[in-house]
Amino acid sequence: MSKTTMLASGAITAGDEISIELIEPTDTPAVIFVRWPLAPSVTDPGRFPATCNAILAILAAASVRLAEIAQERSNPWSRP
C-alpha cells in the first residue's frame, strides 16, 4: 500500500500536460514521479520560451509543495 500526493500539474503545450506526484510506499523510501507526455511535445519555435516557462513553473510549484509537506511533517527530506 502506498500514499500518493499530487504536488503539481499543468499544461506545457496546447495538448500536453505534466504532473508531479509524491509516492510514499509503506515498505520503501518515498519517490517523486514526474509524468511526461508519452509522445514528444511539439511547439512552434516562437512558443518555445513559453513552453519552457510552463515546465519550470510546474516544477517550481511541485518543489514548493514538497517543501511545505516536509515542513508540516518536520521530515528529513527538507534540505536547507
Image: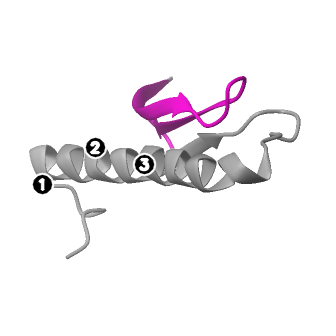
For marks 3 and 2, give the CA distance.
12 Å
* Mark identifier at residue 31: none
Judge the density around disc 1: few (<14), some (14-19), many (≥20) Cα neighbours within 10 Å. few
Quarter of the view holding residue 3: top left
Residue denoted by label 1:
74
From this view, report whether residue 56 is shown above or below residue 15.
Answer: below
Mark 2: secondary structure? helix
Residue denoted by label 3:
57
Q: Residue furthest right?
A: 39
Q: Is residue 31 visible?
A: no
Q: Which of label 1 and label 2 is nearer to you?
A: 2
Task: Specify the amino acid type for callout 3.
Answer: Ala
Label 1 vs 3, first from the N-terminus: 3
Magenta segment, principal secondary structure? strand
**Residue 37 spot, x, y in % from top left:** 76, 34
From this view, report whether residue 49 is shown above or below residue 43.
Answer: below
For marks 1 and 3, give the CA distance.
25 Å
**Residue 38 spot, x, y in % from top left:** 84, 33
Q: Foreground: 44 or 22?
A: 44
From this view, report whether residue 78 is shown above or below residue 52.
Answer: below
Please tell me which residue is depicted at 58% across the width and 42% down the height of the picture. 33
**Residue 54 spot, x, y in % from top left:** 52, 44
Q: Foreground: 33 or 55?
A: 55
Please tell me which residue is depicted at 31% across the width and 48% down the height of the picture. 66
Q: Which of label 1 and label 3 is nearer to you?
A: 3
Q: Is residue 36 visible?
A: yes
Task: Specify the amino acid type for callout 2.
Answer: Arg
71 relative position to 44: left or right: left
Judge the density around disc 2: few (<14), some (14-19), many (≥20) Cα neighbours within 10 Å. some
Residue denoted by label 2:
65
